[in-house]
Amino acid sequence: MREVRITTIDEPGLEDFAGLTDVALRRVTEPEGGLYIAESLKVITRALAAGHRPKSILVIEKWLDGLRPLLADHDIPVYVGEPDVLESLTGFNLHRGALASMHRPPLVSPESLLTTARRVVVLEDIVDHTNVGAIFRSVAGLGADAVLVSRRCADPLYRRSVRVSMGTVLQVPWARLPEWPRAGEILHDAGFHLAALALDDRAVDLADFAAAVPDRVALMMGAEGSGLSREALAASDSVVTIPMGNGVDSLNVAATSAVVLWALRER
């Protein structure tokens, strides 16, 4: 690593970190050769462990010693500065100490992920990055094999998603699905039972579903408010619901993912 001390935000090479407000980062998509931002030493560590390649690092002086062993084999610039300088550059308080500009890994096909998977989570049009990150954390902690996201679903490698997931989006395999009905065909061809989490007259209790869960199951979850689309429900093999009380009809989608994955965990 090459340490570069900065005292001004005009230093060449800082373009990846300039104005990293949420609005600015929403412009980041998934092109070949694209980038994503990893925030904090823990997340950077997970990104490197997953084999992702760093382009450059921005770090507050007091966090530098923690970075050195991680980057011993990487010939990249590490920009070091005081908190006020880095905040003026990024647009927010860098209280987690470090940001890494990382090369996005190539997107894989859903078919390749499904070859060896037994339990996957399908996210349809969930546009809230916090929910996406929290769901990935549940997947990592509670034993699903992969996540498949719709084309309009929020980017799992968006900075907030990565942060909320505690970096688990970097270790959980994921892929983009095509539109329905093709998405359902891909899952069915791989031998998956499609279980839609939804409020529906034909829904079965989660406990009953868990008592006889199919060997290969795809758990389908939709956006807050609108839920799963008609096309997704039409592709499903069963509809599952979490019984609720006190006039509450459903949980937040991230909470739902945790409850369902815990109920279906391997015993």
Image (tube, grey):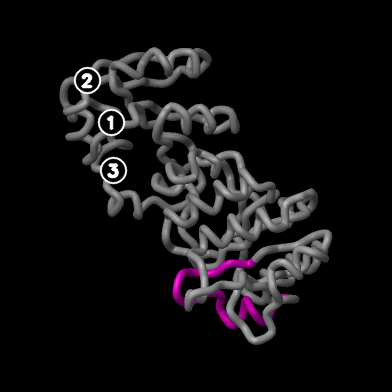
Residue 112 appears at what percent x and percent y? 73, 52
**Is the C-beta separation of discs 2 and 3 under 8 Å?**
no
The quadrant where residue 84 appears: top left
Would you identify the image quadrant in which residue 148 lies? bottom right
Q: Secondary structure at mark 3?
A: loop
Query: Alpha-carbon distance for marks 1 and 2?
Result: 10 Å
Q: 179 left or right of 248?
A: right
Judge by depth and name the residue closer to the eye, 261 or 47.
Answer: 261
Disc 2, SS = loop
Q: Earlier in the sequence, mark 1 or mark 2?
A: 2
Per the model, the C-alpha gap separating discs 2 and 3 is 18 Å
- At 31% across and 22% down in the image, what residue appears? 79
**Residue 20 badge:** 3
Residues rendered magenta in the picture: 220-236
Pointer 3: residues within 10 angstroms few (<14), some, or many (20+)?
Answer: some
Residue on which the image places disc 1: 14
Say whether residue 192 is left or right of residue 10.
right
State if disc 2 and disc 1 touch (CB < 8 Å).
yes
Residue 225 in percent (x, y) is at 45, 75
Give the image location of residue 163, x and y in percent.
43, 42
Residue tagged 2? 6
Q: Residue furthest bottom?
A: 201
Say if the magenta span includes residue 2.
no
